[in-house]
Image: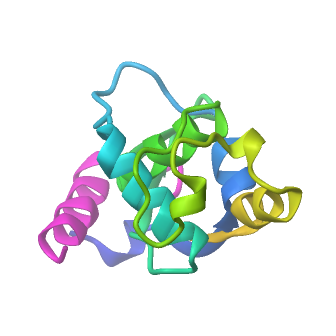
Amino acid sequence: MDPNKIRFGRRFKSVRDLLDLNFSVGHAVSVPSLDEMTAIVETMLVNGPMARVTLRSLLDDTVTVCTGQKLVAALAAFAAGARLGRTVFLPEWSGKSLAELPNSVQRRFYRRDVDVLEIEVGTPDDVAGAVVAALQASV
């Protein structure tokens, strides 16, 4: 593998910026269960650690989620109106959607930073695959 062909950058994107990306279709997406979505969102809302997301930029200005699919799917579902399940740390928010939470919480949700590793356009498939495989093995 030629290290000169590896083109990626680590950035922090807000949840709003992450969800505003144009995701490619046709790839299997790991959809979280209600309990998984609730745990991911609640952890995020109490400023707990979140998984890193790896994105691969494509020529048609779309991105593919390579790692962190459940995180992205959970955040997207909650932003789209899904209700939380039974929460552990925030019991008063059990069963609520994002729109039903206080405005300050909604702002915090959309402004929360997500650690994103973006594999840029032009990175050869074999190199991108090796980077993603290494990241998945380290989880």
Among all residues in the image, which is located at the extreme right? 103
Instruction: Locate residue 16, reporting x and y percent.
Output: 74, 52
Question: Looking at the image, which residue is at 39% across and 69% down?
Answer: 51
Residue 121 shown in magenta: yes
Q: Which of the 4 image quadrants contains residue 11?
A: bottom right
Question: Looking at the image, which residue is at 73% across and 53% down?
Answer: 17
Q: Using the image as rendered, state which of residue 91 and residue 127 is in the foreground.
A: 91
Instruction: Give the magenta-colored segment's residue range.
Output: 115-139
Instruction: Locate residue 19, reporting x and y percent.
Output: 65, 44
Q: Is residue 132 left or right of residue 90?
A: left
Query: Would you place residue 94 above or below residue 25 in this image?
Result: below
Q: Is residue 41 left or right of residue 106?
A: left
Q: Is residue 36 left or right of residue 105?
A: left
Question: Looking at the image, which residue is at 76% across and 67% down?
Answer: 108
The count of marks equals 0
Q: Using the image as rendered, state which of residue 38 and residue 132 is in the foreground.
A: 38
Residue 12 shown in magenta: no
Question: Looking at the image, which residue is at 21% across and 69% down?
Answer: 1
Among all residues in the image, which is located at the extreme top? 26
Residue 1 shows up from this direction: yes
Query: Would you place residue 2 above or below residue 32 in this image?
Result: below
Q: Which of the 4 image quadrants contains residue 39?
A: bottom left
Query: Would you place residue 107 above or below residue 43 in this image?
Result: above
Instruction: Locate residue 54, reporting x and y percent.
Output: 42, 59
Instruction: Locate residue 91, reporting x and y percent.
Output: 51, 62
Q: Which part of the image, by quadrant, shows the C terminus?
A: bottom left
